Amino acid sequence: MNVIIEPSWKEVLGSEFDKPYFAGLAAALHAEKARGVTIYPPGGKIFNAFALTPFDQVRVVILGQDPYHNPGQAEGLSFSVPHGIALPPSLKNIYKEIEDDLGVDMSHRDGSLEGWARQGVFLLNAILTVRAGAAASHSRLGWQTFTDAVIQTISEKRSGVVFLLWGNFARSKKALIDTSRHLVLEAAHPSPLAGGAFFGCRHFSKTNEYLINHNLPPIDWSK
């Protein structure tokens, strides 16, 4: 499989691309495209999180479930939307928690989290593609086998990474992480459907405190 992915990730994940499940995944995506099915994000953005945050630069992991399935929203980064796209409800709540937690003004921010990714925040969706208008439509293609391997690789080959697991789906991935080597912070999902249970988690200040204590620069969440 000739997968175009950032070189440091290709090096640590190389064997995954040669496994039968990945060939089946690629074949399923090609078959859907051949039938004229619209898939998000666009092909060049599927591995965007990997492109913007090389393996050795990962300091924080924010795990999402699958990409936005409406036109123009998905850009290959969990919770993020491209510049100029209206803020999704979950991202609005994330920004509100940052304001309350850190006392910074987020009103200037649009929905693109590229600035976080370039600081070492790995914005990984467990499922990397979705059929237009159909949430979780690619949940059984094999992506989770791949992204579980990604999480395990970070856990095994890095140390001192902060994993932010929001909601039951993300929290189910905790078993893949060595908590003796990394910090795992859990909270309710930021979606309004969680009834505001996300608020008050203070994950952003806790993340920066941990990074500073491990002699790493904090994340500027306002950028």
Image (cartoon, rainbow, N blue to C red):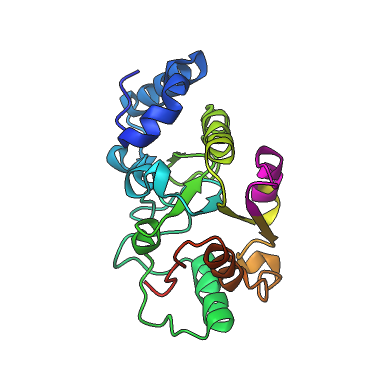
**Vertical side of 66 occupied by 11: above or below:** above
The residue drawn where x is 44% and y is 39% is 129
User: Going by the image, does 103 lie left or right of 51?
Assistant: right
Instruction: Pick the quarter of the image with the N terminus.
Output: top left
User: Going by the image, does 127 lie left or right of 220?
Assistant: right
Magenta segment includes 201: no
User: Going by the image, does 139 lie left or right of 23?
Assistant: right
Instruction: Pick the quarter of the image with the C terminus.
Output: bottom left
Q: Quadrant of residue 48?
A: top left
Q: Give x and y (percent) for residue 109.
A: 37, 75
Q: Give x and y (percent) for residue 44.
A: 28, 39
- Residue farthest front in this picture: 215
Q: Give x and y (percent) for residue 112.
A: 36, 63
Which of the pair 203/3 is nearer the observer? Answer: 203
Magenta segment includes 171: yes
**Vertical side of 57 occupied by 106: above or below:** below
The residue drawn where x is 47% and y is 84% is 104
The residue drawn where x is 41% and y is 55% is 120
Q: Give x and y (percent) for residue 61.
A: 52, 52
Q: Which residues are magenta?
A: 170-183
Q: Quadrant of residue 28?
A: top left
The residue drawn where x is 31% and y is 42% is 42
**Vertical side of 123 occupied by 196: above or below:** below
Q: How many marks?
A: 0
Which of the pair 133/49 is nearer the observer? Answer: 49
